[in-house]
Amino acid sequence: MPHRRIEDLLRELAPQVLAVLARRYGQFDAAEDAVQEALLAAALQWPDEGVPGNPRSWLLTVAGRRLVDEFRSESSRRRREADDALLDVPTQPSEQDDTLTLLFLCCHPSVSPPSQLALTLRAVGGLSTREIASAFLVPEATMAQRISRAKSKIKSSGLPFEMPPPAERAERLNVVRQVLYLIFNEGYTTSGGAELQRADLTAEAIRLTRMLRQVMPGDGETAGLLALMLLTDARRPARCDPQGALVPLDEQDRSLWNADFVAEGVALVSATLGRGPLGPYQLQAAIAALHDEAGTAEQTDWPQILALYEVLEKIMPGPVVRLNKAVALARARGPLAGLAALGELDGDERMAGNHRLEAVRAHLLELAGEPAAAHTAYLKAARMTASVPEQRYLTMRAALTASEH
């Protein structure tokens, strides 16, 4: 099996193995360390020796033994518990999926919100510390400390590994949804590397969000989040050409979009929008539905999208929403209007390292008939992103604008 497929398999299995060990032993921090060691052992052995017939069982056994060794080193009491635990490590582990329980554990209110997000992206999303640090625009060492503190907090709190009662679920729900959305976004557009998207992460985010909706069936925002993921992921088959180059939304072959995902997403939006408190995920899903229901790029209802972004900005103000609103403004009222809106973001420190601001600026300058300025902005955006496909696309656009002036 190629190295990349092994990496994808390990990412998929890691949260499942961690959930089983955390439930069985009640030692989240030790279980997380043991799983990381088992993943390292697999990454070193499987490429040469082959993937075992039951990779989940292999990881569970290796990680369980690491835990036993750790317990044995602590005290005689731990030694006796570990001996009993070792006998309990099954060759064919239970297929019970505790990933959602693990998600709620990581989002316990005793852990600070930034640490909740970081720990959950590591434990449930399978993201590396570097990837998480990149998503939050902080140094990797800072993120490693944040994850370590969160693990220590859960250890000291003695929290049981079980799904919280309904009232507590509601308290943690905002962070749970945010984590799932971040996992999805990292899969839909990776923060770095040679590939534009990672289907394993988007699929896992959708799977977990479906599970969450089963647990919280009456929550409109959870339904909105699922709809947003489905409507966005529906376009994934058309986002790259056969050579792997990025294809922007307006140029995509819409016949390649996943019609089942579009239909399910639109149905969720129709069933929930306006029937309860209006939240940001529902609004973003409604925007995505307008894109997906348009037969061609020219048929997109940009005035309606702009109106929805104006509502979204009131509910969830922030630079990313304002950036997307500027795009809608440009499409509805012309590129100069969009560029004027972008100017308001230039002083926002949160966007200082974000290549998308410069990429949008370049696109709007190109539409406004200013190829020289667009060329400069495209090159600046290309230098700011760690995604190779995005770098190539932005560099290509820069070259095209250079030929126009």
Image: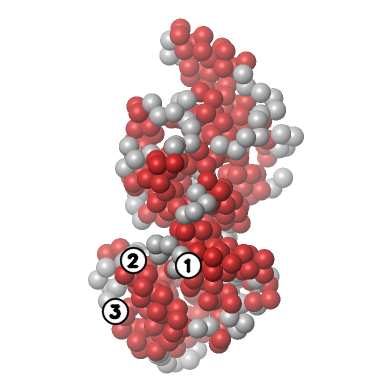
Tell me the CA gap for discs 1 and 3.
32 Å
The answer to whether residue 234 of the structure is visible from this angle is: no
Residue drawn at x 57%, y 24% as measured from the top left: 64
Looking at the rendered structure, which numbered label has been put on residue 225? none
Residue drawn at x 62%, y 26% as measured from the top left: 61
* Residue 190 falls left or right of residue 74: right
Extreme left residue here?
347
Which sits earlier in the primary sequence, circle 1 or circle 2?
1
The residue under label 1 is which amino acid type?
Answer: Leu
Residue for badge 3 = 343
Assign a secondary structure to mark 2: helix
Q: Residues within 10 Å of mark 2 (few under 14, many from 20)?
A: few
Q: Nearer the viewer, residue 276 or 210?
A: 276
The residue under label 2 is which amino acid type?
Answer: Ile
Assign a secondary structure to mark 3: helix
Tell me the CA gap for discs 2 and 3.
22 Å
Q: Residues within 10 Å of mark 3 (few under 14, many from 20)?
A: few
Residue 280 position, x and y percent, is: 41, 64
Judged by depth in the image, the label closer to the viewer, 1 or 2, is: 1
Judged by depth in the image, the label closer to the viewer, 1 or 3, is: 1
Extreme front residue here?
275
Which sits earlier in the primary sequence, circle 2 or circle 3?
2
Q: Is residue 114 above or below residue 30?
A: below
Q: Quadrant of the N terminus?
A: top right
The residue under label 3 is which amino acid type?
Answer: Gly
Residue for badge 1 = 273
Quadrant hosting residue 151: top left
Looking at the rendered structure, which numbered label has been put on residue 315? 2
